[in-house]
Image (cartoon, rainbow, N blue to C red):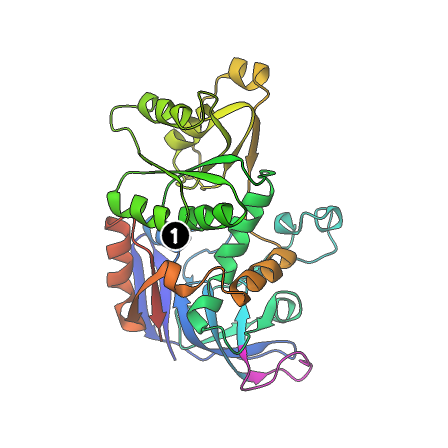
Amino acid sequence: MLAAVLYGKEHVSVEQVAVPELGPDDVLVRVKAALTCGTDVKVFRRGYHARMIVPPALFGHELAGDVVAVGSRVARFQPGQRIVAANSAPCLDCFYCNRGLENLCEDLLFNNGAYAEYIRIPGRIVERNAHQIPDHVSYQSAALVEPLACVLKGLEETGLRAGDHVAVIGLGPIGLMFVKLAALRGAHVIAIGRRATQLERAGRMGAKTLITAAQDGDDGTVDAVKAATRGYGADVAIEAVGNPETWQLAARLVRRGGVVNFFGGCPNDSRISLDTSMLHYSEITCKASFHHTPGLIRKALDIVRHGEVTEYDFVNREEPLTNLLEVMRHLMSHNGHLKTAIIP
């Protein structure tokens, strides 16, 4: 089969590899759509992912497709079914799983290889984190379930309520998912981005206040958020960039008693400085969110099933698998683009 192999920093090759062999609990899926992701772009740029992928390795993790073969012990699926599978599954038996922190599982099983004609879904994911796609849902909409589940986790951990002001920094696909879901929950969304096209998209997804990020330091952005919140600051601030400077900015955007979610993952060994007096005397809650859980995958699929989030919101290009290297280079040099659907 044709598949993308990550060899290192900005080194991806689309080449012929063996079709994966199945164990008794595994499922083989013919990929119908694999979506690009900001994480994949970071992995391409850096040549690794601290938790998810070590090169050389098959590449890509947001997918939907058709079951073409199942292992001898598989009962949940059969050939011909349309399926969406998450990129991981927890063990459900370790210290963290027993405390409801399945995303921090000590034996979290990751699966990569969506940029390929076929992908093997390991038995643990088949059992705990794979689902049949409803008939009315497209492959590309279904493939949004994994990133949407990550965003749901971040949003739920902020305690956001209807009527709250939430500032979202960074308006790539993940930031726009935060905008969309927060607006659906009745929040007043303040979208902060650098490009007019990003801000226009955020407005179409429900953002009420659009702020162009200050080019000469953060004070202008802080002032603009305060002006939109009667001088208080946002109830919630979400950093969806993955940059130490914007992590620091996010903490300055919230009111006393506010919540900051550091969602974007920064490069390894990054450090930030925070004003301890502000954090202490203003009772600022700082939270970081990582990955998803099986329960959130199910919730995300329900959102897609009900049409609240669709491919038309987040996917604006289709490309063949053979163009993946050019797509990655383009996404790396053109921030602000939406998702590309890779069609093997």
Residue nearest the viewer, comparing 182 with 322:
182
In the rendered image, the vertical position of residue 305 relative to residue 150, given as above or below: below
Decide if residue 88 is on the left or right side of residue 208.
Answer: right
Pinpoint residue 147: horizontal percent, then vertical percent: 48, 56
Give the magenta-colored segment's residue range: 69-82
> How would you classify the magenta stretch by its main secondary structure?
loop
Tell me the residue that label 1 is attached to.
173
Q: What residue type is disc 1 on? A: Pro
In the rendered image, the vertical position of residue 340 relative to residue 191, given as above or below: below
Q: Can residue 113 be seen in this view?
A: no
Report which quarter residue 318 is drawn in: bottom left
Neighbourhood count class around disc 1 (C-alpha, 10 Å): few under 14, some 14–19, many 20 upward: many
Decide if residue 109 is on the left or right side of residue 204.
Answer: right
Label 1 residue SS:
helix
Decide if residue 135 is on the left or right side of residue 16.
Answer: right
Is residue 208 covered in magenta?
Answer: no
Pinpoint residue 161: horizontal percent, then vertical percent: 59, 39
Pinpoint residue 205: horizontal percent, then vertical percent: 40, 51
